[in-house]
Image (spheres, grey):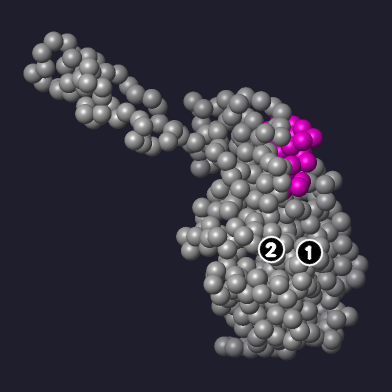
Amino acid sequence: MIWKRKLRDETAEPIGSDQVDPDLSDTLPDNQTAPAPTVIDGTPGASGEVWRRAAAEPGPMLPRFMASAFDDVETDLANESARRRLALRDALGASQPVIARESFAGRREAMSALINAVEEQRVHVVIYGERGIGKTSLAHVFAETAREARYLVIYGSCGTAANFSDMFRSVCARVPRIYHNSVLPNSAEAEKGDTFEVMLPEGQYGARELADVMAGVVGTRVLVILDEYDRVVDVNFRREVAELIKNLSDRAARVQLIITGVALNLDELIGYAPSIRRNITGLPMRPMNSVEVKELLRLGERAAEIRYDAAALAMITQMAGGSPYLVRLLGHQAGLLAMNDNRSVVGDADARVAVERVIAEWQASLPRRVQANLARDEARVHWGLLVAAARAGSSADGWFTVDDVYAEMGGVHSPLAIERDLKLFVNTVDLLERREGPGDPHFRFGYPGVASLLMMSAAMARLAA
């Protein structure tokens, strides 16, 4: 059962058998009668006039946006509170990746390593880690930094239908042809404003043909960012990218690839390719430590002129588990709660309610089938096993083994008992997936978000106890 308590902003309970409905006169005591309904016309006495006066008076103003679509605070709402709330949203909003350096914090070492790999080692970089750990944000902020250094940066987001020829044709369409060594600055080709796209073969092509074109880059350096590479399902796409990396490196081309994706290690993202290992470097994204969490929340403090006290900071750090996404989400929610009460200090109570809201929202967003399975007796009985499985599956791809769960449970139960109970949640209670292969069977939660929900609920239950 997911741990929760009534939030302080919930509305009153619906009318039940022990409450009086003023619209039903037969629920009133015998010595009372329901008031006669007021009518508009023909009502004796003053009741009609009272109704007309009430109808003429304006009611409460409906809620309005605090700012316009231009991000300007509206004139009649231009007050300090609105400005600070919008500033907190801009600093700690978790719905989108960070794209500007002023909203980026806590990843100095990763940024330094990425710049070093590109600038000094001249290698291709693979950024990998679990979902929500900040890979895309790092790529965006790195792109901004590289453009300031006059690099030509081209960003592309991969999808399940990604096609090698189409993806890199769009990349080449953004590289001016004047940067090719076959074009003179004052030639007719340069004045036409063509791009590298016109130099590609018609129709489908491969890594070798693309490398022939990209090897001619002069006068600049080109960085191609392939974000969400883990979503690519086309094996040929991945094979061609690996071949492209080898060809570009062999020719010392002024083009480098930055690949990001959800993965546990380098091989999961690019495959086992010994021929290109010396041409790439892996950059794992680690969970944020407490110092980095504090640095990230400081963005909200400066923007909204608030302060997270030590208890709130500890709560958010513990519940976020090193995820920048959760740090921002919890920090934003807790900050708004304090500002709603006209307080500038965010305390432990604000952080707790923020966690409760996130848990409630996550649970409500799950499919009804998943919610029902979490509420079943089997889930209640094996609650500790599910939480241990959630911790064991906190790696990038979510898969875990019986031995992983055994380690998380401290050896309290035997591996055979653990495997038997895990199978229960594959077959009888549809919460886990099972994958057979070499070695032990692997399991993972079948729906995203369930593992995080279980871990946060367990942590809140421990605090409540």
As drawn, 98 above or below 249: above
Residue 432, given in percent of the width and then of the height, sits at 61, 70
Any mark on residue 412, and which? 1
Inspect the image, locate mark 1, and give the three-letter code of the amino acid beneath it.
Answer: Val
Kindly identify the residue that appears in the image at 76 percent across and 53 percent down: 322
Which disc is residue 318 wearing? none
What secondary structure is the stretch in magenta mostly built from? helix
- Helix, strand or loop under label 1: loop
Per the image, the residue denoted by label 2 is 385
Residue 266's x, y, as percent? 79, 75
Q: What amino acid is found at the position of numbered circle 2 in the picture?
A: Leu
Above or below 209: residue 262: above
Mark 1–mark 2 distance (CA, rounded to whole Å): 11 Å
**10 Å crowding of disc 1: few (<14), some (14-19), many (20+):** few
Q: Earlier in the sequence, mark 1 or mark 2?
A: 2
Bounds of the magenta segment:
298-319
Q: Vertical placement of 302 versus 229: above or below?
A: above
SS class, disc 2: helix
Query: Which one is nearer the viewer's eye here, 13 or 66?
Result: 13
- Can residue 424 be seen from the camera position used here? yes
